[in-house]
Image: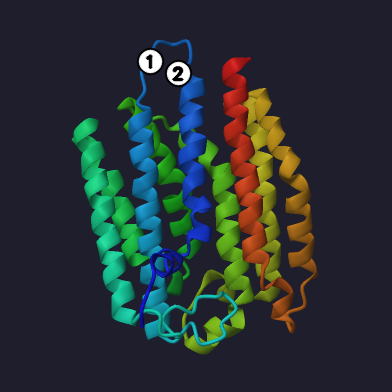
Amino acid sequence: MKRTLKDWVLVTRPWSFPASMIPIFASTAYMAYRCHGTGVEYSMANAAISLFLLMSLHAAANLIGDYHDHVRKVDLPGSLNGVHAIYDGTFTAKEVLYYAYALLAAGSLLGLVLLLRTNLSAVWLGAAGLALASCYPWLKYHRMGDVAVLLGFAVLPSVGVCFAMTGTYVWEASVISLSFGMLTVAILHANNTRDIANDTRAGISTLCMRMGWTTSRKVYAMEVVIGYALVAVLMAMGTLPLASCIVYLSLPLAVSNTRLMLAADPMAEGQICNLDQRTAQMQLAFGVLLTLSFVIALFL
C-alpha cells in the first residue's frame, strides 16, 4: 500500500502530543519566571531540544502500545479508540514496531546532545524515559499505566527540562507538574474506563478493571479535582504566582467532563467514547493557561 507523509505522521497519533508538550511549555515558562531578576542563566535552546526529545519518546510509546495491543488482540477492527492503521493495512505490525525503534533512537540521540550540553549526571532521567516508553504496554497490562503516565508526562519531563535549562535540579517543578499531571492521568483513566469490557475480553488487567465501573468513575472525578485544587494550594504556599488563578478559566470543561463521567451508564460505554479526547482538551486548556500565568507573572 502506497503511504504518504501524512500516513507516517498520523500513525504516531499526533493529537495526543499536547500531553507531552504541556510539561515542557509549563516548566520552561516556570523557569523563566523563577530565574527572572536573579541573575541565573538558563538555556531556551535546551528547552527546545527537550520538547522534541519528549515528543519522540511519546510517539514511540504510542507505536509500541499499538503494536502490542494488536498482537494481544486488545484493539480489534472498529475499536472505540480509533487506532486502525494496522488493521486497515496502512502499516504492518512490524513496520509500526520498527518505526517506534527509530523514534526511540532519535530520542536517545537528542538526550545525548542534552547530556553533553549540560551534565552527564542526568543520564538517569533519559534512562527512565526510555524505560517508560519501551515498557508502557507491560505496565498498562499490569495496572501500572497511571503511574507510568504521571511519571512520564509530568514529573520526569518537568524535572528534566529544568535541569536542561539550568544544570540544576528544581524539585518544585515536580510538585507543580502534579497539577497538570493528574489531568493527563485522567485522559488515560477515561480511556481505560471506557474500555473495561474490551480489556476484560482481551485478558489484560488495567487499574480501572480492578476498580470496577463505579469506583473508576469516582477516581476520574478525584483526579480532576486534585489537579485544580493543587493550583490553589501551591498559590497559597507561594510556589505558584497569583496569576496562576487563570487556570480556573478552564473549570467549565472540568465540570462538564466530570458530570459526563459520573452520569455514564455502565451498559452504554458509548456515552464516554470521546471522554478521553474531551479530557485531553481540558488538560491542554489547563496547561496553556498555567504556562501563560508564568509569562504574565514575569512582566508584573
Is residue 175 in sight in this rendering?
A: no
In screen coordinates, is 96 left or right of 223? left
Residue type at mark 2? Cys
Q: Is residue 244 above or below residue 40?
A: below
Question: Which picture quadrant has residue 294?
Answer: top right
In the rendered structure, are the residues bearing label 2 and label 1 in contact, judged by CB atoms less than 8 Å apart?
yes
Q: How many marks?
A: 2
**Whole-percent x and y of residue 251?**
75, 45
Residue type at mark 1? Val
Quarter of the rendering occupied by the C terminus: top right
Q: Secondary structure at mark 1?
A: loop
**Whole-percent x and y of residue 77?**
52, 87
Q: Nearer the viewer, residue 167 or 209?
A: 167
Q: Is residue 74 above or below residue 282?
A: below
Taking the spot 47% from the left edge, 86% from the top edge, the residue there is 203
**Whole-percent x and y of residue 298?**
57, 19
The residue at which mark 2 appears reads as 35
In screen coordinates, is 52 left or right of 214? left
- Model colouring: rainbow
**Whole-percent x and y of residue 198?**
56, 84
In screen coordinates, is 291 left or right of 73? right
Taking the spot 53% from the left edge, 59% from the top edge, the residue there is 15
Mark 2 and mark 1 lie on one chain; the one further toward the N terminus is 2
Is residue 143 in sight in this rendering?
A: yes
Q: Is residue 134 above or below residue 48?
A: below
Taking the spot 44% from the left edge, 85% from the top edge, the residue there is 87
Q: Secondary structure at mark 2?
A: helix
Tag shown at residue 40 = 1
